[in-house]
Amino acid sequence: MPNSPASRLVPFVERLLGGSLPVGLRTWDGVRAGPPDAPTVVLRNRRALRRLLYAPGELGLARAYVSGDLDVEGDLAEGFRRIWALSRSGAARGAKLGPREWAEALRIAVSLGVVGPPPKPPAEEARLSGKLHTLLRDKSAIAHHYDLGNAFYQLLMDESMAYSSAYWTSEDEGYDLEQAQWDKLELICRKLGLRPGMRLLDVGCGWGSLLVHAAKHHGVQAVGITLSAEQLQHIRGRLAQHDLEDRVEVRRQDYRELTDEPFDAVATIEMGEHVGEENYPEYTRTLYRMLKPTGRLVLQQMSRGAVAPGGGAFIERYIAPDMTMRPLSRTLGHLETAGFEIRDVHALREHYVRTVRAWEKTLESNWDDVVALIGESGARVWRLYLVGGALAFEENRMGVDQILAVRSSDAGLSALPATREWS
């Protein structure tokens, strides 16, 4: 149909991309264009295009999808995969709006009746204030992601409430996320060399999965800190349930506020991403200060190259505002500068693909319950997050690693075994 919105949009987009559309496109009048065997992007109304006009690229697309102005029919992951393949090929590198392209975009927008005031961003978008990585702003950033409500996270995760990459040790059909998370927690405890009576510090303890596991199965005394009010409430209930209140202490506290005597072991599992590049040296110095000589540290953390260290516009606005991921080498450098001796680096990237897809499957199979807990827009945020996150790990645009480090004694003693006894 020569006068349809699709017929005007597709040639313009393909000129920008320098090639054919990798996905289908259907506009609000029902006309579809693009490859017939591909997932279809559906523009439900003119407002979807207006969002893209005011915020071209990832942010505008995210706002349109979260609000429901834009939808995807078919396999959302496959749609992402085709778009990223186009990006990797270099064909989309010239897809930038210069003066001529902006003029044409505006002409098309006027002809389609799209021009108007900028639509209000969805309520799910983070709106933080104050100086980056001050204690008050960090609390707000953590609350944005982790204080959605414990009921939602209990629905999404396994019984342990471990919100980090699992460790998948089997391909058996009956082997599930709960067992893989148990194996991850056990791996951390073995790497730390935990024994009854030792003192463990968990910096950024989440919903208490490691605290409970280490106290129950390895007999440690443990302290966990978190900035999330919801996590604190949940952990205290778990400690009472497992009769661990005399062996585990949990606090709503920032790592910068730690003044305890040194511990035998320290863990910090996917918390360093929230620290920020400027504060990361203080973070690693604190971890070092919290350890006795020959004490071990396990730090599990996501990594990313130089492009979009915050994860991109969608992640930074909707999921983890102020997050910073760095290359693994830079994290190791920070740890060594603080005084740590690096003893082992364990890449878990493929494990995170399986973990995130397990969460995604749970989200989709409980969609109505998720919508009841966090609303339709909130559910769409999480669908986009999990589908995109799994693909980022699959395609090596993000990684995750478990780092074992030790605070060696003044005489250079590490007290580690000669072989990897945790393997």
Image (cartoon, grey):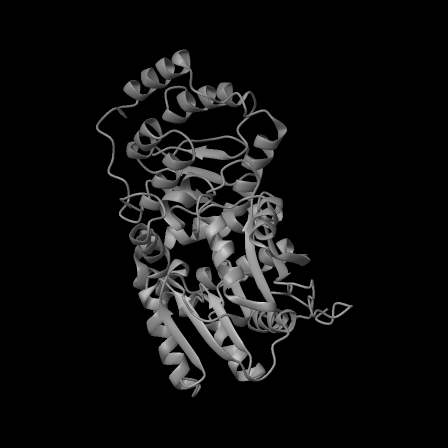
Task: Residue at 35%, 45% (x, y): give it.
Answer: 66
Task: Residue at 58%, 84% (x, y): give it.
Answer: 196
Does any portion of residue 293 appear in the rendered image?
yes
Q: Residue extending furthest left?
A: 117
Using the rendered view, name the quadrant where residue 353 is placed: bottom right
Q: Residue extending furthest front?
A: 411
Q: Residue extending furthest right?
A: 418
Q: Position of residue 380 (x, y in %)?
A: 38, 51
Q: Is residue 60 above or below residue 10?
A: below
Q: Residue extending furthest bottom?
A: 243
Looking at the image, residue 90 sits to the left or right of residue 234; the answer is: right
Q: Position of residue 118 (x, y in %)?
A: 25, 31
Looking at the image, residue 402 sits to the left or right of residue 259; the answer is: right
Q: Position of residue 63 (x, y in %)?
A: 34, 40
Q: Is residue 216 above or below residue 298?
A: below
Query: What quarter of the picture does the C terminus occupy?
Result: bottom right
Task: Residue at 44%, 79% (x, y): give it.
Answer: 248
Along the line of sight, which residue is nearer the eye, 397 or 419?
419
Along the line of sight, which residue is nearer the eye, 11 or 308?
308
Q: Position of residue 239 (x, y in %)?
A: 41, 81
Task: Residue at 29%, 53% (x, y): give it.
Answer: 136
Query: What quarter of the picture does the N terminus occupy?
Result: top left
Q: Is residue 269 above or below residue 86?
A: below
Using the rendered view, name the quadrant where residue 372 is placed: bottom left
Does any portion of residue 158 appear in the rendered image?
no
